[in-house]
Amino acid sequence: MSTQPDACPQCTMTEIHRQGAYHVCDTCGYEWPFERAEEGAGDEVVRDANGVALASGDTVTVIKDLKVKGASTVLKVGTKLKNIRVGSGDHAVEAGGVMLRAEFLRKV
């Protein structure tokens, strides 16, 4: 679903082509992955279980008992997590040193 970029990020020439998982500039030979070409297109929005966008610093509530991998503890339903950090990827929310999936959280 990636689109062809307009120009090479290094030399700004428009003669580019795809090769495997990379874009290649015909002029300077610079290669960059498809994802990097799409970074400026828009940032991924992390949404909670109700579809509300989450931002760093928000307070959320856990909506399901979650086992913490590598520890003997469990995050219980209703646990409030304050001052979260939002990143990207599968486990996009960090709270208290634990990475969580946003689908198990609800913004307070």
Image (cartoon, rainbow, N blue to C red):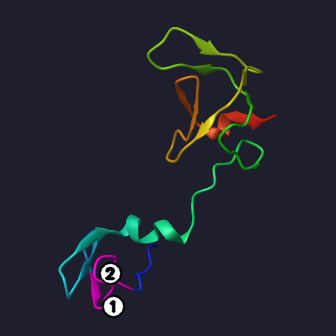
| Cα gap from disc 2 to disc 1, whole angstroms | 6 Å
For residue 45, above or below residue 13: above
Is residue 16 within the magenta segment?
yes
| Left-right relation of 108 to 62 | right
Inspect the image, locate mark 2, and give the three-letter code of the amino acid beneath it.
Answer: Cys
> Do the residues under discs 2 and 1 have CB atoms within 8 angstroms?
yes
62, 41: nearer the viewer: 41
Rendered location of residue 29, percent (x, y): 17, 79
Is residue 14 within the magenta segment?
yes
Q: Residue at x 70, y 45 (%)?
A: 54
Q: Main secondary structure of the magenta part?
A: loop
Local packing at callout 1 (Cα closer than 10 Å; few below 14, some 14-19, many 20+) is some
Residue at label 1? Answer: 14
Q: Residue at x 52, y 38 (%)?
A: 91
Residue at label 2? Answer: 8
Local packing at callout 2 (Cα closer than 10 Å; few below 14, some 14-19, many 20+) is many
11, 51: nearer the viewer: 11
Residue furthest to the front in view is 11
Q: Which of the two labelled residues, at mark 2 and mark 1, occupies the earlier sequence position? A: 2
User: Element type at marker 2?
Assistant: loop
Residue furthest to the right in view is 108
User: Element type at marker 1?
Assistant: loop
Tell me which corner region of the image, top left, top right, bottom left or bottom right, holds residue 42: bottom right
| Left-right relation of 5 to 15 | right
Tell me which corner region of the image, top left, top right, bottom left or bottom right, holds residue 74: top right
Q: Which segment did they paint magenta?
A: 7-17
Residue furthest to the left in view is 29
Inspect the image, locate mark 1, and give the three-letter code of the amino acid beneath it.
Answer: Thr
Quarter of the figure that contains the C terminus: top right
Rendered location of residue 64, percent (x, y): 70, 25
